[in-house]
Image (spheres, rainbow, N blue to C red):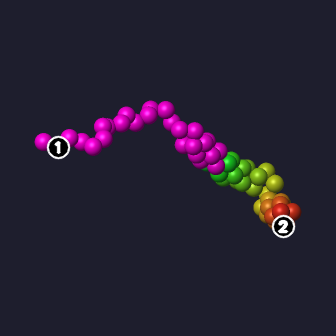
Amino acid sequence: MAQPVSTSQEVPTVISPARRAGAVVATAGAGLGVALLVGAPILWLHYGTAVFFEMIASGIAACF
């Protein structure tokens, strides 16, 4: 009967640093997205539509 060429190796249970960093980046991105989605209606209600759109337009203009 044939024997296996290599023995089975155990899978490490510790998460590698690269996977941990990816999880941190994904969590931070999700948190930023939630903050933007929650912040926009709050600004809209507080400042009104005209001021809200002016703030967004001036912020975009400042970036470019």
Helix, strand or loop at label 2? It is loop
**Tag 1: amino acid:** Ala
**Rendering quarter of residue 3:** top left
Disc 1 secondary structure class: loop
Percent position (x, y) of residue 60? Answer: 81, 64
Q: How crowded is mark 2: few (under 14 residues within 10 Å), some or many (20 or more)?
A: few
Residue sitting nearer the eye, 63 or 10: 10
Count neighbours of disc 1 (C-alpha within 10 A) and say few if under 14, some if 14 to 19, many if 20 or more. few
User: Is residue 15 rendered to the left or right of residue 58?
Assistant: left
* Residue at the image point whose x is 83% and y is 63% from the top: 63
Q: Can residue 21 be seen in this view?
A: yes
Query: Count the marks: how many?
Result: 2
- Answer with the quarter of the image where residue 10 lies: top left
Q: Which residue is under mark 2? A: 64
Picture disc at residue 11: none
- Which residue lies at the image location 27% right of the left edge and 43% below the top edge? 5
Q: From the viewer's perspective, tell me whether residue 8 is left or right of residue 22.
A: left
Dot 1 or dot 2: first in sequence order is 1
In percent of width and height, residue 62 lies at: 86, 63
Query: Which residue, given by chain and number where applicable, does mark 1 sit on?
Result: 2
Residue depth check, mark 1 versus mark 2: number of the one nearer the observer? 1
Compared with residue 13, is residue 59 higher up or lower down, i.e. above or below? Answer: below
Q: Which of 23 and 2 is in front in this view?
A: 2
Q: Estimate the x, y position of residue 7 in percent, counting from the top left.
A: 30, 37
Q: In this view, does 60 lie above or below 41?
A: below
In the rendered image, the residue lying farthest to the left is 1
Is-magenta flag for residue 16? Answer: yes
Distance Cα–Cα, label 1 vs label 2: 68 Å
Q: Give the range drawn in magenta.
A: 1-29
Decide if residue 31 is in sight here.
no
User: From the image, which quarter does the C terminus lie in?
Assistant: bottom right
**Quick check: marks 1 and 2 in contact, CB under 8 Å?**
no
